[in-house]
Amino acid sequence: MASLHLSVPSILSHPQACTIYDARSGLLGTKVSLVGGLPSNLLTVCLESKSFCKVRGQFRTQAAVVSGEGNFLSYSNNNDVFGQNGDDIDRPVGIDMQADALALGALAADTAPTSVGFSEDNDEYELDLPTEGFASISEAIEDIRQGKIVIVVDDEDRENEGDLIMAAELATPEAMAFFVKHGTGIVCVSMKGEDLERLQLPLMVSSKENEDKLCTAFTVTVDAKHGTTTGVSANDRAITVRALASGESKPDDFNRPGHIFPLKYQEGGVLKRAGHTEASVDLAMLAGLNPVGVICEIVDDDGSMARLPRLREFAKQENLKIVSIADLIRYRRKRDQLVELSSAARIPSNWGPFTAHCYRSFLDGIEHVAMVKGEIGDGQDVLVRVHSECLTGDVFQSARCDCGTQLDLAMKKIEAKGRGILVYLRGHEGRGIGLGHKLRAYNLQDDGRDTVEANEELGLPVDSREYGIGAQILRDLGVRTMKLMTNNPAKYIGLKGYGLAISGRVPLITPITTDNKRYMETKSAKMGHVYDVEQGNTTSSPNSDNGKSS
């Protein structure tokens, strides 16, 4: 057992004679004391090469936590959690306080006065901030409005390519010449389905016959009939592009086939399909222009597709803004209305009476539920849980995870408080991979992989959940600031930026059992989840005999 000594500035007040705790859950524990004659309860626990720290004591402190990637947060605790003799105060279900500060990374004690809850000045995850190395979506929208070209990059797990994009109605011969010079030469025009139908431009192949890797929806190719010659020159292409963008054009205004490739935009845009087709139309609409965009893939000097960082060099060389589709998705999720309230009814439950509000997503039609207790009123400091659907844990009480026990505990806390909301997000099964894939991952876990390795081996994301819909539901219910019940920092990140503020974190401490111990350790070590390590003593699962899985 190692020891760690921290110097304590004089600003710390009300020192208490407290016992220093050790971790006895099979994890590496580190005993911590304070230099300067002030004993305190501070416990660090190491999982693999990473540390977890818990600070307790009757003094004011801020736990500033920074992971190896520098991408986590800081939050504070201004609550007295010990009595005069160092004993825990018996408080009802710990609702009104954040009784710990436990997180992944290195802990630094900052004794300046702090606000309750997560750091207010950490804006790293503000939705309008661009990904490092990219321009903001607002800047790109302004350039599109002015008829300029921007570069849009998709995800590295998708095409990992950059396209030149501009508004179709503002296309010029000079812009088309630039597209052909630096692109593949295949100039495409992204259009809504209704406009393609109006111009009688059918898909090149049906959706069932489309064998394109990303199912890009090409229509028959066209050239403008009037004002063009062969249709291949920059001037001819600009005329064709503008004709496609015009609401006055008719089917007879185009020759088929031609040199311009119209593409069918998927309704919902990048929120439904994260492609350049959708990004170009979304940017045009956001700029207040007709919903038609021009795109062309950028090639490198050797004819290969240009990738990052070459695209950044090209953008700097040509003085073009470069943005990511991921940032455009975040921009739209913050501003677009994603859900609507479809119904509500009183639900008597084992926890007490709640009102269930059903919200339907405009994106995929999935129905989500918000269980509301009491009057939300001014929306300040509402106790909130945003819970991801887990059929196996929530309904069948699987001991592999802590989902069901967290759901039960959250509902109990809300009932005890008399005011709060639990948002139940469907479509989040298995952290977004779906029930079938989750069961396949379970088989790999039984063969020795952890929950992260199993997803990766299946070629699936570790966590693909998105919390924007949950945030919009909370906003619609009147929540403005919340005390968030979570052990997962990603939920804080995912909820920030939707006009909601988090005034505090309420941990959900559930038993670590023989069946979920490795799962819990993996979530801590690899996914940054926060746990009260004093609760880490391993117990037998309710579904196990003598600590062995049944």
Image (cartoon, helix red, strand yellow):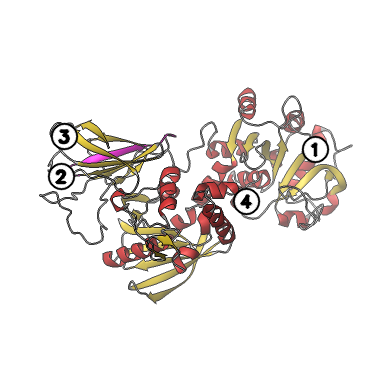
Task: Give the Cα distance between marks 1 and 3.
Answer: 71 Å
Q: Residues within 10 Å of mark 3 (few under 14, many from 20)?
A: few
Task: Return the residue at label 4.
Answer: 269
User: SS at mark 4?
Assistant: helix
The stretch in magenta equals: 57-69
Q: Earlier in the sequence, mark 3 or mark 4?
A: 3
**Residue under the image location 25 percent in, 57 percent down:** 94
Q: Mark 1 or mark 2: which is in front?
A: 2
Residue 339 seen in this snapshot: yes
Task: Give the Cα distance between marks 4 and 1.
Answer: 25 Å
Task: Give the Cα distance between marks 3 and 4.
Answer: 53 Å
Task: Return the residue at label 1.
Answer: 237
Query: Does the residue at mark 1 contact the one at mark 2 (Cβ under 8 Å)?
Result: no
Q: Is residue 99 left or right of residue 179?
A: left
Is 24 or 152 nearer to us in this picture?
Answer: 24
Q: Earlier in the sequence, mark 4 or mark 1?
A: 1
Residue 254, above or below 316:
below
Q: Earlier in the sequence, mark 1 or mark 2?
A: 2
Q: Earlier in the sequence, mark 2 or mark 3?
A: 3
